[in-house]
Amino acid sequence: MSEEVISLEAVSFAYHRDAPVLADVGLAVASGEVLVLLGPNGSGKTSLLNCMAGLLHPQEGTVRLCGRDIRSMGMRDIALKLGYLPQLQTVSFEFNVLDYVVMGRAPHLRFGKSPVHSDYRHAEQVLDRLGIARLAESPMDRISGGERQLAQIARILMQEAPLILMDEPTNHLDYGNQIRALRLIKEMAAEGFAVILTSHVPDHAIWLRSTVGAIRRRGPLVTGRAEEVLNESLLSELYQENISLHYLADRGHCICVPELSELVNGVEHVSKDRTEERKC
């Protein structure tokens, strides 16, 4: 039986008293499980991750990390149990990629100690796994946004924490690297990590065959297996657009298809009108 890594019990959070962001959220994630948080912009996905990471403190409820109330844990204790990839992360100093990734070992080092050869060797293996070994000596501030995102994922892997939180991990990645990042997340779950990520693409949850936490504009958090809770009604409610699900028999899964005929036909209509104008 998988061990519960994080649980939230009746968690409520608000930046302002009269404007709650999260209300009575309850969920649990075990080792080897992937949870994808879905919801529109401003629904509270990042705030929920920050509560899980101990960066925000709920006004009500409890967050338990590996069985302990996260409010009773120090920063080093949290870092040993939890790795966090935020949406935006800046590098203030000119670290090269390898040194930046090795810093992920910091929670495991005693005060005043430096990384050793085995730490650098491990970092090189992680970079190779992510397909960016060629960037090891490149300055972090001189690589592309997508490459920087992969380096940040590598640094999180170096922490070897049982729980990994990722806020839009496919942000800045091209289509191929998005697929490879999702494949890596699937592999991490198979290795026993618990992974919680936010996404604006519901297909990600379908591809990962994950658990879903859907944060609606109104009403409680909807949780369950992707294939059980992601239906056309919920998706259309979340994103305020007509979205249908289509099963691809040769792929063995569904895809989300938005209603685009009006958009496409509108573009075609405008194009024809402009063609006629040029003829005149």
Image (spheres, helix red, strand yellow):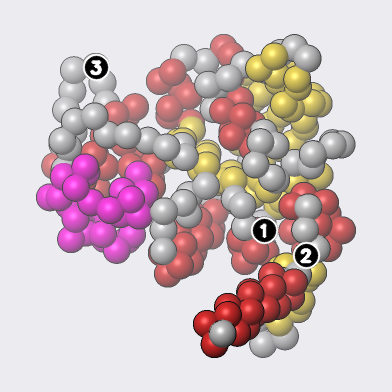
Pointers 2 and 3 in contact (C-beta within 8 Å): no
Label 2 to label 3, Cα distance in Å? 53 Å
Classed neighbour count for the residue bearing mark 3: other residues with Cα under 10 Å, few (<14), some (14–19), many (≥20): few
Determine whether, in the image, residue 178 is placed left or right of residue 223.
left
Mark carried by residue 111: 3
Range of residues picked out in magenta: 124-152
| Residue 130 in sight here | yes
Task: Give the overall secondary structure of the magenta segment.
Answer: helix
Q: Is residue 70 left or right of residue 126?
A: right
- Give, as a three-letter code, the residue at label 3: Phe
For image coordinates 17% across by 37% down, the residue present is 95
**Residue at image coords 18%, 23%:** 113
Which residue is denoted by mark 2 in the rendering?
A: 243
Could you tell which of marks 1 and 3 lies nearer the N-terminus? 3
Q: Quadrant of residue 67?
A: top right
Tell which circle, 2 or 3, labels the residue nearer the N-terminal end.
3
- Residue 42 vs 252, above or below: the answer is above
Residue 278 lies within the magenta run: no
Query: Is label 1 in contact with label 2 (beta carbons under 8 Å)?
Result: yes
Residue type at the position of mark 1? Pro
Q: Secondary structure at mark 3?
A: loop
